[in-house]
Amino acid sequence: VQLQASGGGLVQPGGSLTLSCAASGFILDRYDYAIGWFRQAPGKEREGVSCISSRAGTTYYADSVKGRFTASRDNAKNTMYLQMYSLKPDDTAVYYCARREVGQITPHPERYRYWGQGTLVTVSS
């Protein structure tokens, strides 16, 4: 199982970015897997931002991103996405995607077994 996160970069406040998480070694819609998006800012703990179940499409959003971030998946491309709008400086962090062995979504990072390498998002003017 491998996850490859990409799409990070420098964006001005109020801007948008879309992160991608390409999966290999498993097929997203063969079983229901929980896919989580997490972020970690310098000096802070890793936090769950959004989760989506790969088959059922159940979603979760942290209060800090609700209404601004949207998680989705493209099963044909075996890829998950995190669309981020109205970005704020507080959104600056390294973003990771991760997968559980089961489909129950949860924002707790310790429950995820497989992790991508992370992609840096910097929101700054």
Image (cartoon, rainbow, N blue to C red):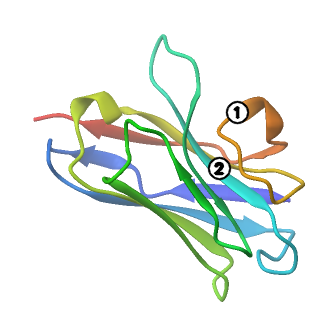
Q: Depth check: 57 or 85 in front?
A: 57
Q: Depth check: 63 or 71 in front?
A: 63
Disc 2 packing (10 Å; few <14; some 14–19; many ≥20): many
Q: Answer above or below: position of 106 versus 72.
A: above
Q: Disc 1 on helix, strand or loop?
A: loop
What's the mark number on residue 10? none
| Image side of residue 95 versus residue 17, left or right | right
Residue at left 69%, top 56%? 35
Q: Which residue is mark 2?
A: 36
Q: Which residue is mark 1?
A: 108
Q: Disc 1 and disc 2: Cα gap in Å?
A: 9 Å
Q: Disc 2 on helix, strand or loop?
A: strand
Mark 1 or mark 2: name the one nearer the start of the chain.
2
Q: Quadrant of residue 88?
A: top left
Quarter occupied by the C terminus? top left
Q: Depth check: 51 or 98 in front?
A: 51
Give how far across and how far down residue 68 sits, in percent. Answer: 31, 53
The residue sitting at the top extreme is: 43
Residue at left 81%, top 60%? 103
| Image side of residue 120 versus residue 122, left or right | right
Disc 1 packing (10 Å; few <14; some 14–19; many ≥20): few
Q: Answer above or below: position of 39 versus 72.
A: above
Which amino acid, mark 2?
A: Gly
Give how far across and how far down residue 72 sits, in percent. Answer: 53, 70
Give how far across and how far down residue 89 sits, in percent. Answer: 23, 31
Residue at left 72%, top 51%? 105
Q: Answer above or below: position of 122 versus 83.
A: above
Q: How many marks?
A: 2
